[in-house]
Amino acid sequence: MMQGYLHEETHFGVFLLVTLILGGGCAWLMGRAIAITWRPWWQLVGYTMILGMSVRFLHFSLFGGSLLSPYYYLVDTTLCFIISLFGYAVTRTNQMVTQYHWITKRTGLLSWKRR
């Protein structure tokens, strides 16, 4: 029923492999790298747009998908941005509770508070 809304390929496995596993893995590492270098989260936006173009190119070159489809570019980029933001938040939380353990205390996977 959802075929065609999230992916254009005939097999969901292609979408899963290219967008979620390859693109999502790169997005997670990108969010992690930006958090480790203490840069702000909004820098993820520009880098994710570049990553979205790369994911679209992989769909095009490996599986014959459309290269210049604004809708599927937006889908791929949005999913990669969500994954990169999650990687950023997890890494930033780990940084705060590890490096400033005398000031902060973990309250969840994505949050901390002052002691």
Image (cartoon, rainbow, N blue to C red):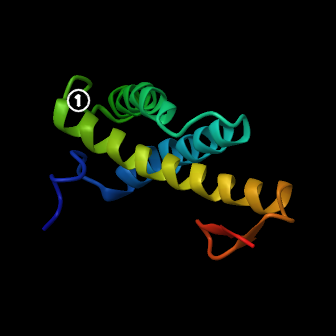
Based on the displayed image, in which of its 4 quarters is residue 36 positioned? top right
Based on the displayed image, in which of its 4 quarters is residue 66 positioned? top left
Picture residue at 23% right of the left edge, 51% below the top: 10
Picture residue at 53% right of the left edge, 42% below the top: 27
Quadrant location, the N terminus = bottom left
Q: Which residue is mark 1?
A: 66
> Compared to 96, does 66 lie above or below?
above
Given residues 113 and 34, the one toward you in this image is 113
Quadrant location, the C terminus = bottom right
Circle 1: residue type: Ser
Residue 38 lies, in percent from the top left, at: 69, 37
Residue 106 lies, in percent from the top left, at: 71, 72
Based on the displayed image, in which of its 4 quarters is residue 77 positioned? top left
Given residues 100 and 84, the one toward you in this image is 100
Residue 72 relative to residue 26: left or right: left
Picture residue at 26% right of the left edge, 25% below the top: 67
